[in-house]
Image (cartoon, rainbow, N blue to C red):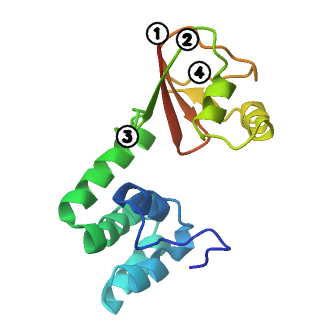
Amino acid sequence: MSSSWGNIISLLDTPNDMYGKVMSLRDDLIPTYASLCALVSSEEVERIKKELATGTNPRDLKMSLARKIVALYHGEKKALASEKNFKDVFQNKKEPEDTLVVKVKPQTLLRDVCLSGNIISSKSEWHRLVTQGAVITISGTKIHDPNFSLSRNETFRIGKKRFLKIELF
């Protein structure tokens, strides 16, 4: 692991972050992380390598590894909750339970809400995210206009992992 490579799983990470980081690992790193982070036996590591070589879906191996790592540092109950949260958000396209909720007036620019809520760091980042199609409603509609104004209650995914729920008043 290396913080400069962006693949570090910190002991201080929340269960959901820890689970998500394991799920974003490159497939070839699964055996290494199993050995170093989950206290898995060498026989288990060899089994994982064989499963990867024979075509087992790496996602399933990562989910098992993520459960083990989160359970080791946060307990089995939080590991199962993190797995449910991951499935809900990334497989079933639901909003996370800990989504930031912001109440704003109609016609407020989504960009301004994201800037004031520290969801994005700059207008440049906003423009890049919109241009790349990375600002999406929870229902799957991409936002293409950098000056998109809010006209109804909606939940947005900003990039891969940031969520924002808008409630108009």
- Of marks 4 and 2, the one in the foreground: 2
Residue at figure coordinates x 42%, y 36% from the top left: 99
The residue identified by callout 3 is 98
Of labels 4 and 2, earlier in sequence is 2
Calculate the distance from the C-alpha at mark 1 to the C-alpha at mark 4: 23 Å
4 with respect to 41 (left or right): right
Residue at figure coordinates x 53%, y 45% from the top left: 161
64 with respect to 29 (left or right): left
Picture coordinates of residue 137 (x, y %)?
54, 24
Three-letter amino acid code of the residue under disc 1:
Phe
Which element is circle 3 on?
loop
Of labels 2 and 1, earlier in sequence is 2
The numbered dot on residue 141 is 4
- The crowd level at tag 1 (other Cα within 10 Å; few <14, some 14-19, many 20+) is few
The residue identified by callout 2 is 105
Residue at figure coordinates x 48%, y 62% from the top left: 21
Of labels 2 and 3, earlier in sequence is 3
Three-letter amino acid code of the residue under disc 4:
Thr
Which element is circle 2 on?
loop
Picture coordinates of residue 59 (x, y %)?
43, 58
- The crowd level at tag 4 (other Cα within 10 Å; few <14, some 14-19, many 20+) is few
The residue identified by callout 1 is 169
Residue at figure coordinates x 60%, y 13% from the top left: 150
Check the image and report above or below for 76 versus 115: below
Residue 45: quarter of image = bottom left
